[in-house]
């Protein structure tokens, strides 16, 4: 398929997607939340707005785990959107998982929130731009010695931002995939076996990092560092 065919297909698909989105919104406005959720689910590719509306449709049906899952997916695409953040926090408060979804240590919590505040693409651009600015500042020190002090200060400041962006980018790329617990209560076990010792319970809406995948079982880690094996059916990937 050549690029001309791709463009034609895209131009044909865009009005269809727009109409399907309007149809899903109309179902939501009419209070037909289950049908609206199904309509939003069928939309591909999904934007932050689609995930947000899908989360709202699940929230209206009191399926808060699914609501949180889709708010989290929306936040991945639009991490600073105030409506997404507000609804995500409200749903987490309803299930009492606000604290359990955050690292208990203040510095780790601050860093995790900072990394989540930008998309992968945004962190990449910050890294590239600050690298070039730092190089220009160094060049200014060499070519314009009269203003060397100012250029040195600028180079140090920009380099600090570059380091922060680079570490955040590495953090985002190397972080394990995350999932949301969708069932009311799931037991985290010591081994990937139905009769293994229960280590702790995971409640609906809890966010976990997937450390290992063994098909039916996932080895997950909670924000507070607790680890255990859970059944795949209990969670859904963000």
Image (cartoon, rainbow, N blue to C red):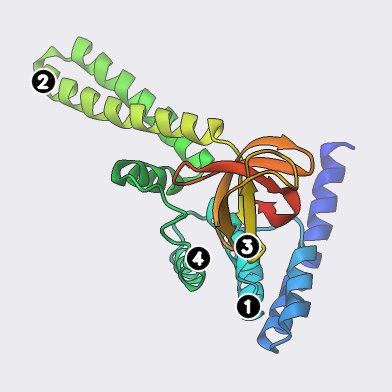
Q: Residue at x 80, y 64 (%)?
A: 42
Distance, label 3 to label 1, CA atoms, is: 16 Å
Q: Give the mark, 4 or 1, whose residue is nearer the N terminus.
A: 1
Using the image, tell me which numbered label, if any, was put on residue 88. Answer: 4
Residue 226, given in percent of the width and then of the height, sits at 50, 43
Distance, label 3 to label 2, CA atoms, is: 60 Å
Looking at the image, do the residues carrying marks 4 and 1 touch, with CB atoms under 8 Å apart? no
Mark 3 = which residue?
185
Single out the residue that lies furthest toward the right.
1
Q: Give the mark, 1 or 2, whose residue is nearer the N terminus.
A: 1
Between marks 4 and 1 in the image, the one whose residue lies nearer the viewer? 1
Distance, label 4 to label 2, CA atoms, is: 46 Å
Between marks 1 and 2 in the image, the one whose residue lies nearer the viewer? 1
Q: Label 1's element?
A: loop
Q: Label 3's element?
A: strand
Q: Residue at x 45, y 70 (%)?
A: 93
Residue 77 seen in this snapshot: no
Residue 8 falls left or right of residue 121: right
Residue 104 seen in this snapshot: yes
Looking at the image, do the residues carrying marks 3 and 2 touch, with CB atoms under 8 Å apart? no
Q: Give the mark, 3 or 4, whose residue is nearer the N terminus.
A: 4
Mark 2 = which residue?
149
Q: Label 4's element?
A: helix
Between marks 3 and 2 in the image, the one whose residue lies nearer the viewer? 3
State the residue in front, 191 or 208. Answer: 191
Mark 1 = which residue?
62
Distance, label 4 to label 1, CA atoms, is: 14 Å
Using the image, tell me which numbered label, if any, was put on residue 12. Answer: none
């Amino acid at each position: 398929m050549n690029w001309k065919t791709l463009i034609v297909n895209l131009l044909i698909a865009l009005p269809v997607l727009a109409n399907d989105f309007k149809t899903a919104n109309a179902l939501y406005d009419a209070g037909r939340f289950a049908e609206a959720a199904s309509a939003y689910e069928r939309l591909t590719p999904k934007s932050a707005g689609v995930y947000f509306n899908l989360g709202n449709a699940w929230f209206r049906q009191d399926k808060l785990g699914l609501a949180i899952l889709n708010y989290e997916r929306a936040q991945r695409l639009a991490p600073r959107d105030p409506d997404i953040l507000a609804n995500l926090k409200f749903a987490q408060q309803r299930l009492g998982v606000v604290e359990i979804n955050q690292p208990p240590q203040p510095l780790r919590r601050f860093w995790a929130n900072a990394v989540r505040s930008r998309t992968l693409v945004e962190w990449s651009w910050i890294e590239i731009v600050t690298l070039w600015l730092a190089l220009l500042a160094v060049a200014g020190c060499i070519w314009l010695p009269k203003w060397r002090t100012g250029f040195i200060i600028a180079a140090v400041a920009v380099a600090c931002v570059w380091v922060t962006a680079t570490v955040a980018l590495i953090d985002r790329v190397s972080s394990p995939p995350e999932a949301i617990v969708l069932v009311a209560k799931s037991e985290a076990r010591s081994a990937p076996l139905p009769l293994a010792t229960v280590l702790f319970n995971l409640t609906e809406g809890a966010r976990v990092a997937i450390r290992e995948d063994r098909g039916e079982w996932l080895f997950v880690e909670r924000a507070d560092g607790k680890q255990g094996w859970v059944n795949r059916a209990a969670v859904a990937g963000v």
